[in-house]
């Protein structure tokens, strides 16, 4: 079975609808076809949160609850805490010995993070090297990531090829898998959904919160009266309906669209339907989350056991690496 590795930095502990459409949904589908590793990248989180470790600690639990509530199955998926695998920093060091400084200087994410006010540290600079070690230790074949991480996966590819050329076949060459689903619009219709943009609906939002957010959602700004022909294209209400309605409920949506475009339905009626659709989608997630929330020790045990399993793999790979580099002294 081919292996997947993907992950998130615990700089946030919650997921929103955009995260679901852009990557989480994909992971749920892939868990049956691939041996899936999901990494909670707490070492990477330190590059921007070195003085916020209490937050990281809380967010680790939040991410785990999010994964489990959407149906990632701990029987199929190995959940890994990055700092529980010390081999990752050791491999990163060896990879660092064959990484040109200029390559790290050119990484687009570095400039972006610095522009956002991140500290200019060694850890930030070497971010892609650590990420390559994350990917190569479990010998992942496929790395599903967002567009913003593509360059990092390409770096991991390049370094794997280079290592294999220098020291002999050791790593499979990982492929990025970029989600085909375009980024979900925010409730303001302006930009992509983002936690810090204040335009997100979270998987953890209560029924009433969803209702409030949908009722104040952006629709078609040129439509003043329900009898005006409206625009469905680029209208987040319809985009969310398409993304979250169950197949059996697709028919009312095309009817709503027709009526909207011909000025035969008001925003409120469509929004009320969307509230129903979103709550139907979120209800099973809420139920599952509540189950796990009442067993916090179970959630952390799942992470611990996954980490232990991944560590055995990591140790195996690292000893191959040391052998290949002729560092196996004892
Ligand atoms: N850098 C990724 C992000 O910020 C998180 C991450 C760390 C990751 N290591 C990884 C993703 C390995 C995929 C594979 O989103």
Image: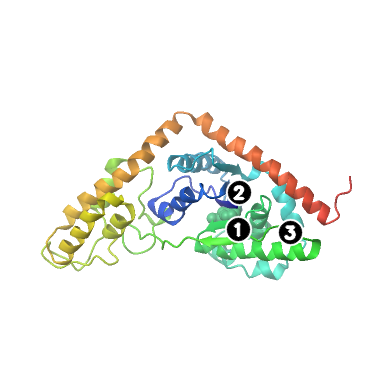
Q: Nearer the viewer, residue 36 or 233?
A: 36
Instruction: Please indicate, yes or no, whether residue 91 appears anywhere in the rendered image.
Output: yes
Q: Are marks 1 and 2 in contact (CB under 8 Å)?
A: yes
At x 48%, y 45%, the residue is 13
Considering only order in the chain, which callout, 3 or 2, is on the residue closer to the N terminus? 2
At x 37%, y 54%, the residue is 198
Q: Are marks 1 and 3 in contact (CB under 8 Å)?
A: no
User: Which numbered tag is attached to residue 95?
Assistant: 3
Q: Is residue 296 left or right of residue 217?
A: right
- Distance from disc 2 to disc 3, alpha carbons, whole Å, reads 23 Å
* Residue 71 position within the rendered picture, expressed as x and y whole percent measured from the top left: 44, 42
* Residue 306 position within the rendered picture, expressed as x and y whole percent measured from the top left: 60, 39
Of all residues, the one furthest to the right in this rendering is: 329
* Residue 317 position within the rendered picture, expressed as x and y whole percent measured from the top left: 73, 49
Q: Determine the image quadrant of residue 330.
A: top right
Q: Quadrant of ligand 1?
A: bottom right
Q: Crowding near pointer 1: few (<14 within 10 Å), some, many (20+)?
A: some
Residue designated by label 1: 119
Q: Nearer the viewer, residue 122 or 62?
A: 62
Q: Is mark 1 within 8 Å of ligand 1?
A: no
Considering only order in the chain, which callout, 2 or 1, is on the residue closer to the N terminus? 2
Residue designated by label 2: 50
- Answer above or below: position of 35 versus 128: above
């Amino acid at each position: 079975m081919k292996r997947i590795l993907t992950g998130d930095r615990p700089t946030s502990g919650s997921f929103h609808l955009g995260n679901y459409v852009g990557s989480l949904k994909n992971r749920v589908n892939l868990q049956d076809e691939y041996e899936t590793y999901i990494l909670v990248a707490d070492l990477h989180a330190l590059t921007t949160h070195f003085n916020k470790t209490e937050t990281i600690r809380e967010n680790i639990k939040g991410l785990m609850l999010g994964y489990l509530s959407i149906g990632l199955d701990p029987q199929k998926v190995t959940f890994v805490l990055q700092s529980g695998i010390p081999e990752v920093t050791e491999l990163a060091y060896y990879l660092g010995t064959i990484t040109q400084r200029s390559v790290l200087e050119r990484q687009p994410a570095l400039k972006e993070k610095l522009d956002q006010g991140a500290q200019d540290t060694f850890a930030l600079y070497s971010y892609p090297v650590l990420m390559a070690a994350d990917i190569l230790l479990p010998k992942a074949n496929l790395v599903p990531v967002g567009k913003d991480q593509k360059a990092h996966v390409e770096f991991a590819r390049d370094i794997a090829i280079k290592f294999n050329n220098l020291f002999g076949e050791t790593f499979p060459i990982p492929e990025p898998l970029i989600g085909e689903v375009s980024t979900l619009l925010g409730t303001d219709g302006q930009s992509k959904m983002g936690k810090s943009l204040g335009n997100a609906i979270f998987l953890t939002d209560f029924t009433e919160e969803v209702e409030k957010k949908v009722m104040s959602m952006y629709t078609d700004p040129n439509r003043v009266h329900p009898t005006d022909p409206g625009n469905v294209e680029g209208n987040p209400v319809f985009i969310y309906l398409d993304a979250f309605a169950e197949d059996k409920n697709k028919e009312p949506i095309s009817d709503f669209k027709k009526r909207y475009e011909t000025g035969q339905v008001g925003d409120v009626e469509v929004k009320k339907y969307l509230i129903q659709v979103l709550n139907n989608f979120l209800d099973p997630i809420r139920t599952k989350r509540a189950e796990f929330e009442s067993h916090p020790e179970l959630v952390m045990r799942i992470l611990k056991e996954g980490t232990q399993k991944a560590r055995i793999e990591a140790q195996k790979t690292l000893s191959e690496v040391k052998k290949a580099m002729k560092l196996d002294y004892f």
